[in-house]
Amino acid sequence: MTPAARTQAAIELLDAIIAAARDNGPAADTLIARYFAQRRYAGSKDRRAVRELVYAAVRALGERPISGRAAMLALAQGDPSLRATFDGSPHGPAPVAEQERAAAAGLAPAWLLERLRASGLDGAELDALVERAPLDVRVNRLANGVEIGLGEPLPGLPDARRLPAGKDLSSFAGRVEVQDAGSQIVTLAVQARPGQRTVDLCAGAGGKTLALAAQMANEGLILACDTDRARLQRLPPRAAAAGVMIAETRLLDPGRELDALDDWRAQADAVLIDAPCSGTGTWRRNPEARWRLTPDRLARLVATQSRLLDIGAALVRPGGALVYVVCSLLDEEGAEQAASFAARSGWRADYPALPAGSPHGAGLRLTPARDGTDGFFVARLVAPC
């Protein structure tokens, strides 16, 4: 592919990503994979170059642009060589018209920036939200023959390793799990121990379930739940590959979760709620998520989080713990949500000793700028005895 053809490919991909963000369609990575699956002529260097252009444009634009061309023109404003590819050559973009406008650079939509600042973020904290993330993995202590020399160890996380971006992990299947250091850190707030009965209420594909099983040394029981059948079905084969033998899955009916959990009422030593959220702490990995979020969608997420806290609380035994986690840095999803639950339930906040994070309301907050992880809020709330 010529440089101009690469630019045009990036424009076409950005058009698809913009439409998907508007219509709640597939993620950018999925769209990129599909695009090149249909264009076998593109070599690995072409694919890498186009992908770099796409993500550079997405990271540069806080507001969802009107088109992929406007997005690429914004990127070209600071790159004369990129602007020169708008030359009208075969397979390349048309020349730039005299009055043609580029998309405006920015960090996030204005309404969202206002809420982030109200949550105590500004300056370097905001800028770090869209920087490129490292590749972190969790070494599976349950597996035999773990390669302990893999990657760079991280302080306070004996099972964590930080690797160069793009590292091929296919030969480490079952022995390592891709998991951001922040996700590993907040899972430690559960304080899982061998022999416990633990619930992972929003387990998804089970990344935190597998981490809990390792902490519990494969002794006890973990009930991994979710309302998404497709995601939950990915957990059993992952658990088998990782040597996890204490995890059971249970599919829940949205809106009727407690009907399927009646046998676990007041039985769990700990319940982990990795709640659905805006994902504002994961923009380093999913920068197009800024283009998907709306005030209405955020309000629906906040309502769901509150309901999940009440569901989880019903499962915790007296003196047990409810660990609430969101990969969001918005206080309405984090500190305010935990404070509201504590006020209506009478549960007390228990600040866990974690290797990163700073006190924030009733819990701890991790940020990319301060902690070098994805952004998280975690609260550990203890039931009255």
Image: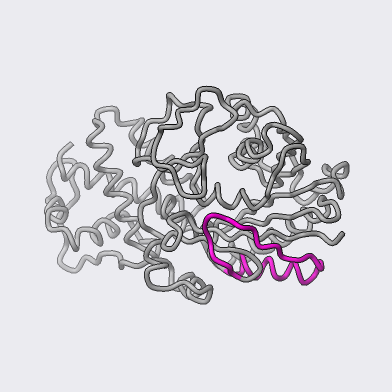
Quadrant of residue 123 within the rendered picture: bottom left
88 left or right of 332 in image: left
85 left or right of 360 in image: left
Tell me the colour scheme of the image: one colour
Quadrant of residue 58 within the rendered picture: bottom left
- Judge whether residue 211 is colored magenta: no
247 left or right of 276 in image: right
340 left or right of 384 in image: left
Q: Is residue 119 above or below residue 51?
A: below
Q: Position of residue 377 (x, y in %)?
A: 58, 61
Q: Position of residue 339 (x, y in %)?
A: 70, 70
Which of 123 and 360 lies nearest the eye of the viewer? Answer: 360
Which residues, given as a range, are shown in magenta?
Answer: 331-360
Q: Residue at x 36, y 35 (%)?
A: 167
Which of 293 and 204 lies nearest the eye of the viewer? Answer: 204
- Judge whether residue 335 is colored magenta: yes
Q: Position of residue 224 (x, y in %)?
A: 71, 39
Quadrant of residue 218 within the rendered picture: top right
Which of 264 and 162 lies nearest the eye of the viewer? Answer: 162
Q: Residue at x 63, y 66 (%)?
A: 299
Q: Position of residue 76 (x, y in %)?
A: 20, 58
